Amino acid sequence: METQHDVVVVGGGAAGLSGALALSRARRSVLVVDAGDPRNAPAGHVHNYLAREGTPPADLLAAGRAEVTGYGGTIQAGRVTAAKRVDDDGFAVSLADGRTVRARRLLVTTGLVDELPAVPGLAELWGTDVLHCPYCHGWEVRDQPVGVLGTGPFAVHGALLWRQWSADVTLFVHTAPAPSDDELEQLAARGIPVVREPVAGVETAGGRLSGVRLTDGTVVPRTALVVAPRFTARSAVLASLGLEGVEQEMHGAVIGSAVPADPMGATAVPGVWVAGNVTTLHAQVISAAAAGLTAGAALNADLIAEDTRLAVTAARSAVAV
């Protein structure tokens, strides 16, 4: 059986819940379908979220769900597999359990996948001792032995960046381009050793990172290792509507993929909005939430315009009769 909503939100993270909250407060019929696999699940806390600093990710989502349902929104556990336009009457949204729901508009906030470098042991420590963002985790590993794993052209930049949080930073060149003479001078001036032997894996003690193992067997003691994942948009639902992820570059290097949208989150498909990491790779939790609010407000304005057109048409028909 199909049920009709003003907006179906695909994804129940910070962006999706924020958009759903704005729409529910605008007295819209909102359904959030959440697959329950948030990107930041491995992390212990959310950081740089004003007035929520240090909140566990699960607690933040629980509070957001309560706020959305408190204003009449509905949240369902499930996975959206596809969506399609149904004439001029919105969209049919297919769920993995066989259900179909109808929506006048869609807000897709499915986020991204962090594709880690092919080094054994990284995945098991991801989000705890294997890190990528100093603004998310730098304070937590301040003054500790930090390693930076080079896999691309930003390795030196990363090492210099993390030096702000610790005086004990080592750059493992690994598969990155060899540092130039100027870069070596900068690294030396900041007291950052450079290890040119490739990395073979990581060592652990008690479930925590204890060192970086090189291909020659040497182990360099480290308690945190910085990596640069490839950020790939979770865009399967959008692809079913003809919206594909587009490669994103930084200084000529591909860092991932994202689905294009305008500043309000509107995509090239009328009636479909996006927010959060699926369209903005660098968005942190607080900026993803802000993008969800922006998209929610834009969606409501679009629905108001449609409601007004329908009302005018109905009024004219009544006069004609």
Image (cartoon, rainbow, N blue to C red):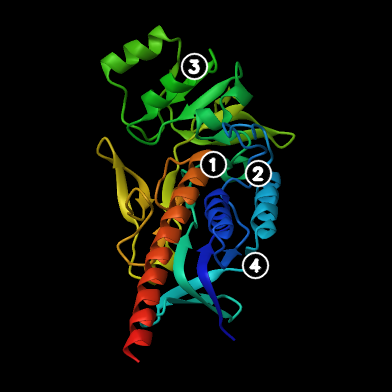
Question: In terms of image quadrants, where is residue 137?
Answer: top right
Question: Which residue position holds label 2?
Answer: 57
Label whose residue precedes the other's in the sequence (4 or 3): 4
In the displayed structure, 132 sits above or below 275; it is: above
Pointers 2 and 1 in contact (CB under 8 A)? Answer: yes
Q: Nearer the viewer, residue 200 or 21?
A: 21
Question: Which residue position holds label 4?
Answer: 76
Question: Is any atom of residue 259 visible in this view?
Answer: yes
For the residues labelled 2 and 1, the Cα–Cα distance comes to 9 Å
Front label number (4 vs 2): 4
Question: Which residue position holds label 1?
Answer: 285
How many numbered circles does the render carry?
Answer: 4
Q: Nearer the viewer, residue 155 or 66?
A: 66
In the displayed structure, does residue 51 sit left or right of residue 286? right
Question: Is any atom of residue 88 visible in this view?
Answer: no
In the displayed structure, does residue 245 sit left or right of residue 57? left
Residue 279 position within the rendered picture, expressed as x and y whole percent measured from the top left: 39, 51
For the residues labelled 3 and 2, the Cα–Cα distance comes to 26 Å
Question: Which residue position holds label 3?
Answer: 164
Front label number (1 vs 3): 1
Q: Is disc 1 surrounded by few (<14), some (14 to 19) or many (20+) residues within 10 Å?
A: many
Label whose residue precedes the other's in the sequence (1 or 4): 4
